[in-house]
Image (cartoon, rainbow, N blue to C red):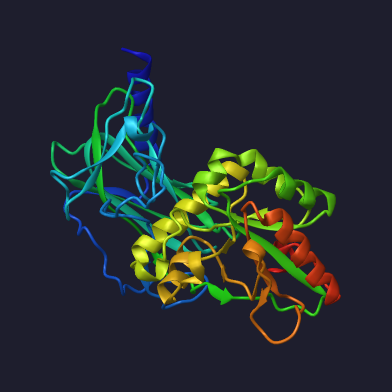
Amino acid sequence: MSTRLSALAASVALLTAFAVPAASASPTASPTASPTTPVSPAGGAGATTVNLATNPGFELPSPALADWGSIPGWSCTGGPAEAAVTTSGAHSGTSALTVTPANDDSTGECAQTVAVQPGTTYTASAWVRGNFVYLGATGTGRDVAPAWTETTSGGWQQLTTRFTTGPNTHSIRLYVHGWYQQGPFSVDDVRVDGPAPAPAVAAGSIPTTDKVVFFTVDDGWQRTPEAERFIADHHLPITAFPLPMPAGTDPDFFKRVTAVPGSSVQDHSVSHSDLSKLPLEQQQVEICDARDAMTRLFGTAPVVFRPPFFAWNADTLQAAANCGTRTVLTADADYSWGASNIWHPGPLQPGDVILMHWTDTLATDLPRALAAADAAGLKPAGLIDYLH
């Protein structure tokens, strides 16, 4: 018996010994749960459950500017060489995820980060097809057995597992994978059922009596050494909102320009689309996928989302909350491309958020904004230091 098959046998034995009622495989369970099923989270009895998974049915299109071959809402270890959305034989709808491990050392794992509440019970489920397919969650704050099946005998079978988050848990990693040398598997109709988070808060400024303003810089397409030098020379805390594509092209630049204490890199969507024209589910893909990209590149998950064009609606606030973001931030002054616009009477005020962009004019936009702040008796400060 090969090493991988020996590992499979050991895993089966371990999971059999570890099996608990909260982790199960049910070929006859309903594919969906009622959207109004009562739950009992620690934060509020009587809340209603919603499906918190992003792109649960693999039906949503990839945003413009997304990585080629990526699965919206999901990160697959083998990338497009292993994982693809297929349009034949779905459990429901028109699409499902099919993973074909590229070699004997791959389980073909696909995963996503799901924002959760501490001390709350969630139920995760997915319909799967194949041999030795697993569904589980890590980072819950407590050990939980994955749900798994030895074989679905060619049909679809639902896997279900339940977990209660720890007292400090705000996100979990949901995963599905096969096993070594066990061939392709398919996944559809994924759910993470739990209480809906309260919508994010929209803001154009930060309430404070401190004599501070906040410099924010969007997009990231044009990165100049002159702007970088001005930021470093003046020790400016910068909140950067780059798109994943330019951030991934030159991550070291964004690390350098956000090196001043109080600086950070936050979320600006994947495609820079007008999110107010998209349904909630697609907005969630835009925000969550950009969050994941920023986390991979810079090591810290964003806590602020800036909607492109400042266009947002109630769905944007809920989608942001579903991605673990508490603040949807616009601005009340614009110093981009030579402008000096303050969208309230008088000079800059404490707590004002100033909009700029990574462009070839930023090296002159920054000193103009700094001069306006100085004239009002204000100094740039770190945005994340003032968020509560």
In this rendering, the answer to whether 282 lies above or below 348 is above
In this rendering, the answer to whether 241 lies above or below 103 is below
Q: How far across and down, in percent of the image, does residue 24 sit?
A: 30, 48
Q: Quadrant of the C terminus?
A: bottom right
In this rendering, the answer to whether 296 lies above or below 322 is above
Q: Nearer the viewer, residue 164 or 222?
A: 222
Q: Is residue 226 left or right of residue 187?
A: right
Q: Nearer the viewer, residue 365 or 289?
A: 365
Q: Quadrant of the N terminus?
A: top left
Question: Can I make out residue 352 in this image?
Answer: yes
Q: Quarter-wise, where is residue 154 in the image?
A: top left
Q: How far across and down, in percent of the image, does residue 259 sit?
A: 75, 47
Q: Is residue 371 left or right of residue 143?
A: right
For the point 49% across and 61% down, the residue is 116
Question: Can I make out residue 260 in this image?
Answer: no
Q: Nearer the viewer, residue 75 or 64?
A: 64
Q: How many marks?
A: 0
